[in-house]
Amino acid sequence: MEIGIYTFAETAVDPRTGRATNARERLAHLLEEVELADRVGLDVYGIGEHHRPDYAVSAPAVVLAAAAARTSRIRLTSAVTVLSSDDPVRVFQAFATLDLLSNGRAEVMAGRGSFIESFPLFGQDLDDYDALFTEKLELLLALRRAERVTWPGGAHTQRIENRGVHPRPVQDPLPLWIAVGGTPQSVARAGTLGLPLAVAIIGGAPERFVPLVQLYRESARRAGHDPATLPVSINSHGFLADTSDEAAAIAWPPYLETMGRIGRERGWPPPSRARFDAERSPRGALLLGSAQEVIDKLLFEHELFGHQRALIQLTVGPTPHDRVLRAIEILGTEVAPVVRAEVANRTALRTADSGS
């Protein structure tokens, strides 16, 4: 199993200090974090795209390119690219360039986005929310398939007459994941297209997402794809420290501030400490605690989903940089080797049983 982390590069006010992190400082810290993640052997680092003052990254490919220059092996992905409000040609060119700079380590994680600020910013109508993504995804897939592209155009994309799209990436095709938050139609579309699936589980029992992963694999099978060749990623909030209580003490204040602030925007009830503690229990959604607790939860979720990748968002709100670095160290040196070995052992046993 691949294990990695992702971030939205938060710059909101730290509830402990009353101080907001400026974008320059947060990006400097982010590059230190991805450099450490590479050094301790994590597999993937993802950066989200947002267009609001409480996040520092509106152009993930630019920041990932800076990370490429400071790393050697870790895969670099958006988390996510808001394809609906972007130009697929520019998305392809940006990540093809990143792929060249990183010597074949770039990925695109495309989604419709959980925030809507980019839509009016780039002149998109929210009434076209799903149609935008569908049409632009089709164009992005065409750009991956061939160097010269002929595209009829549509309501949301331009006509392209036998034009070359350059540069071409090292990887052929450039890896493209579909990120979903739980919409069955989006899950089925990813399976039908034969694209890898990233499922965000940020609350509630992970078991409730099992039918979605089953739908994905069944949709792929019906479309003629082998589900065994299509990876699934489970993306979760979490944090690690030397003890469970320390992890919770570090993570709870920024979690409360961030989820409370976003909740007020969306009409959600305020987060409670009791709910937070329930989510970090063995059957909750948060991958939060000591190394052993996170190992146990990752293996529990692997039993549910049989997935190939797990990504953790360590900074759900402004979190002390030194504590984030320690969390990355624990994840890379104490958690990832154990989980990879156990998953490999389980896979070998199942293969042996099926062949006997």
Image (cartoon, rainbow, N blue to C red):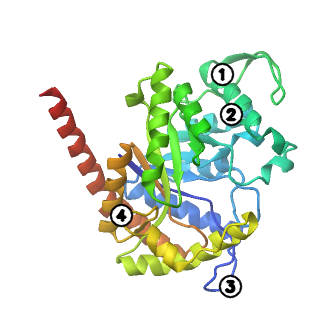
In the image, farthest residue toward the bottom: 17
Q: CA distance from mark 2 to mark 4?
A: 37 Å
Q: Which residue is mark 1?
A: 142
* Horizontal and vertical percent position of residue 28: 61, 65
* Residue 248 vertical position relative to residue 299 in the rendered view, above or below: below
* Horizontal and vertical percent position of residue 280: 43, 69
Asked whether the residues under the numbered discs 1 and 2 touch, taking CB atoms below 8 Å apart as contact, a structural biologist would say no
Q: CA distance from mark 1 to mark 2?
A: 13 Å
Q: Is residue 26 among what the camera can see? A: yes
At horizontal 41% and vertical 29% (from top left) the residue drawn is 227
Looking at the rendered structure, the kind of residue marked 3 is Gly
Q: Which residue is mark 2?
A: 93
* Horizontal and vertical percent position of residue 233: 46, 45
Q: CA distance from mark 1 to mark 4?
A: 40 Å
Q: Secondary structure at mark 1?
A: helix
Q: Which residue is mark 4?
A: 294
Position of residue 266 in the picture relative to residue 31 (left or right): right
